[in-house]
Amino acid sequence: MDKIAIASDHAGRELKDELVAFLKDSGVEVLDMGTNSPDRVDYPDFGIPLSQKVSSGEIKKGILICGTGIGMSIVANKFPNVRAALVNGVFMAKMAKEHNDANILVIGGRVVGKDLAREMVDTWLKSRFEGGRHQTRLDKISKIEDK
């Protein structure tokens, strides 16, 4: 399995730490990109570096967490080749991969509990992109990035 990068702001740090432990216990290699402090930080300072790594292909998958997940979603989706999906349930995590080939999963640390977050991450990692009509749609989105 590929290495997964994970980052959060202060509002998502507790959940990030929980997911780092969960991923490592599952045998996944994790790149923890912070924050590792409860001090207030700006989410772009952590979302940008992770999104750059996914955009360039250096890292295949990432997880971003902030209070609601909205800010991190906006940041991540500014980068070419990034398909960041803000999810708040297992079905959404599954569809994020199967239909949208999401390479960054975004979670709201103040919205989703730890048990649900672990289940969403596990589902996202085990799901596979279906291709077909979904690839046609992603190709249309990629054309926007080519401009």
Image (spheres, rainbow, N blue to C red):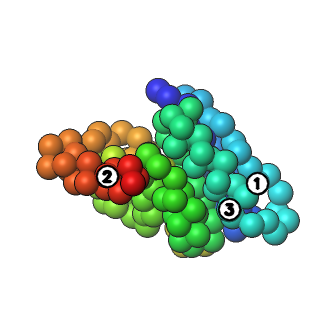
Of marks 2 and 1, the one in the foreground: 2
Which residue is disc 1 drawn over?
Answer: 35
Q: As rendered, which of 101 and 80 lies closer to the eye?
A: 80
Whichever of labels 3 and 1 marks the residue nearer the N terminus, that label is 1
87 left or right of 79 in image: left
Q: Which mark is residue 44?
A: 3
Which residue appears at 41% of the width and 41% of the height? Answer: 125
Side (left or right) of 48 relative to 100: right
Name the residue type under label 1. Thr
| Element class at badge 1 | loop
Residue type highlighted by circle 2? Lys
Rendering coords of residue 88 (x, y %): 43, 66
Q: Tell me the distance, in whole angstroms, between the alpha carbons under discs 2 and 1.
A: 34 Å
Residue 146 in view (yes/no): yes
Amino acid under disc 3: Pro
Q: Residue furthest front?
A: 147
